[in-house]
Image (cartoon, helix red, strand yellow):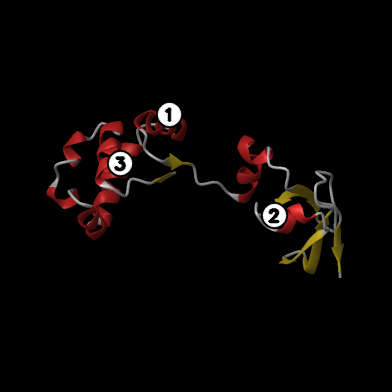
Amino acid sequence: MIIQAANNRLYQRLCRAIDAPELIDDPRFSTSDLRRGHREEMTEELERRLVHRDRAEWQARFDEAGVPAGPILDVRQAFEDPQVRTLPVFWLVTRPDSSSTFRCSMAAGSDMGSGLASSLTVAGPWTRRSTMARRVGSARAAKVLSS
């Protein structure tokens, strides 16, 4: 999980959310600069408290407290996220040996809205070079063409 409490206001909210109000007045952590200077100690203090609840419980507490936080996702988890799945910039890619299929995305604001076909050439462990192509605006699966 990543927690963004970079200013004093957010840090105070974080301390209250993790039931550690005593950290607010701890002289090692009283300013952003001091928290950075005592990063290892700060990490230890946070981890000592965070291990007592699961990620979903902490997320709910942080959301309620107004502390920016969220899970760190691997690629598969990121593409399975309900919010990401609503984006119209996906296409399916199947490995050349057909052993697996995964979703890929172009960043919003790229040339996706131009109406032109886009392609992305990537190197992968399964082939020297693969080209993932999709017709812009279409959410249908695309082929991977190997060279």
- Mark 1 closeness class: few <14, some 14–19, many ≥20 residues within 10 Å: some
Spatial CA span between label 3 and label 1: 16 Å
Question: How many marks do you count on the picture?
Answer: 3
User: Which residue corresponds to the image point at 26% horizontal and 57% vertical from the top-left?
Assistant: 36
Q: Position of residue 74 (x, y in %)?
A: 58, 49
> What type is the residue that disc 2 sits on?
Met
Helix, strand, or loop for circle 1?
A: helix
Mark 3 lies on residue: 10
Mark 2 lies on residue: 106
Q: Is residue 100 visible?
A: no
> Going from the N terminus, do you reach mark 3 or mark 1 first?
3
Spatial CA span between label 1 and label 2: 30 Å
Helix, strand, or loop for circle 2?
A: loop
> Going from the N terminus, do you reach mark 1 or mark 2 first?
1
User: Which residue corresponds to the image point at 87% horizontal and 62% vertical from the top-left?
Assistant: 145
Q: In the picture, residue 14 is in which quadrant?
A: top left
Mark 1 lies on residue: 60
User: Which residue corresponds to the image point at 32% horizontal and 44% vertical from the top-left?
Assistant: 47
